[in-house]
Image: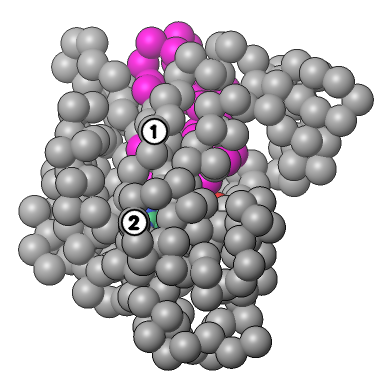
């Protein structure tokens, strides 16, 4: 079924504006496939009618579900391994030893999806530092309310814990809930907070600022969805929320360049990591 040009323009503009997702008409099949469950759930007749609902009220529940369905939440525990090796073998102990008196190391998982990245950081801290629960705090944020709800719950299917988790970590940090799922233990949960946040929203910085500045930020496998201008804005937002000298991990091949902020690359564990020079 064909969709009118103005509806295609509206929905692609909406997705670009709301989540920075750049899609054109050639990706209509993807929009259709992802939104089919929302159409069915609300008993709406067609994609046209769904788009009209969003057009009428961009803040309605259906619009929120459209955003959720269009985000790609693919993630796994200890993804790419080396950022966690860098934390374990270098950054966490260095930052603790540089601390004057008591102040926590603050780490932000800025596109946290369903929480695997943030919990992997917490497991790494517990494996590396004595009394890690009092030395490290972690914030996980994501635009997807469904992903954040799952992250807060901390329950993972057998298939999800098989992706990236060592057997020993599963035994140490998870309780088996039933035949098919595992629950993150309270010790791990206590170190991580989750909240919704849109990286391209102008209110991001005020939304997150009350956590005080971060020492380390993970912003991985999300910058690729933004165009250059939005990417630079996101990088500047992150800089505003990061200590000078703080570190930023991105996904493989995700370049860091701000409009105002300046970052350098340093090598840790023989891999490049971004470090904030000025903002
Ligand atoms: C592919 S996942 C990456 C998850 C994790 N960082 C990793 O590397 O495994 C991308 C995540 O970015 C989130 N995302 C997409 N656009 C976003 C935005 N504008 N603001 C915040 N999060 C966003 C998606 O909801 C999704 O959970």
Q: Nearer the viewer, residue 274 or 155?
A: 155
* Quadrant in the rendering for residue 153: top right
Q: Residues within 10 Å of mark 2 (few under 14, many from 20)?
A: few
Above or below, 76 against 135 in this view is below
In the image, the segment drawn in magenta is 108-137
Q: Nearer the viewer, residue 148 or 117?
A: 148
In the displayed structure, 184 sits above or below 36; it is above
| Viewer-side residue, 168 vs 2 | 2
Residue 154: x %, y % from top left: 62, 27
Specify the color scheme.
one colour
Task: Tell me what residue is drawn at x 64 percent, y 47 percent.
Answer: 76
Q: Mark 2 or mark 1, which is nearer to you?
A: 2
Query: Between 278 and 21, which is closer to the camera in this rendering?
Result: 21
Residue plotted at (54% across, 90% down): 26
Q: Residue 176: which numbered mark, if any?
A: none
Q: Position of residue 38 (x, y in %)?
A: 61, 56
**Dot 1: element:** strand
Local crowd at mark 1 within 10 Å, few (<14), some, or many (≥20)?
Answer: some
Which residue sits at x=78%, y=36%? Answer: 157
Residue labelled with disc 1: 195
Q: Quadrant of residue 35?
A: bottom right
Q: Could you tell me residue 177's position as x and y percent?
A: 80, 18
Q: Is 60 situated above or below 26?
A: above
Name the residue located 22 percent from the left edge and 46 percent from the top edge.
Answer: 204
Report which residue position mark 2 lands on: 57
Q: Are marks 2 and 1 in contact (CB under 8 Å)?
A: no
Quarter location, residue 263:
bottom left
Q: Is residue 112 magenta?
A: yes
If you read the primary sequence from the N terminus, does the residue marked by circle 2 or circle 1 appear first? Answer: 2
């Amino acid at each position: 079924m064909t969709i009118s040009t103005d509806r295609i323009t509206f929905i692609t503009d909406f997705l670009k504006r709301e989540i920075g997702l750049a899609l054109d008409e050639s990706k209509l099949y993807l929009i259709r496939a992802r939104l089919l469950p929302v159409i069915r759930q609300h008993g709406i007749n067609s994609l046209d009618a769904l788009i009209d609902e969003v057009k009428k009220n961009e803040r309605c529940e259906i619009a929120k579900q459209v955003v959720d369905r269009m985000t790609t939440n693919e993630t796994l525990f200890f993804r790419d391994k080396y950022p966690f090796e860098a934390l374990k073998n270098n950054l966490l102990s260095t930052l603790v030893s540089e601390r004057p008196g008591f102040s926590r190391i603050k780490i932000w998982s800025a596109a946290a999806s369903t929480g695997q990245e943030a919990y992997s950081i917490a497991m790494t801290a517990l494996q590396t530092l004595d009394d890690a629960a009092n030395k490290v705090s972690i914030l996980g944020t994501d635009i997807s309310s469904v992903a954040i709800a799952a992250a807060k719950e901390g329950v993972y299917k057998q298939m999800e814990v098989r992706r990236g988790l060592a057997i020993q970590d599963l035994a140490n940090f998870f309780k088996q809930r039933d035949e098919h799922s595992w629950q993150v233990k309270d010790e791990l949960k206590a170190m991580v907070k989750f909240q919704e946040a849109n990286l391209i929203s102008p209110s991001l910085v005020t939304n997150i600022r009350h956590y005080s500045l971060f020492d380390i930020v993970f912003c991985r496998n999300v910058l690729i969805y933004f165009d250059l201008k939005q990417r630079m804005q996101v990088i500047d937002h992150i800089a505003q929320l990061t200590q000078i000298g703080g570190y930023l991990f991105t996904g493989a091949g995700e370049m860091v360049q701000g409009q105002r902020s300046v970052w350098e690359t340093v090598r840790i564990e023989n891999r490049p990591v971004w470090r904030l020079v000025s903002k």
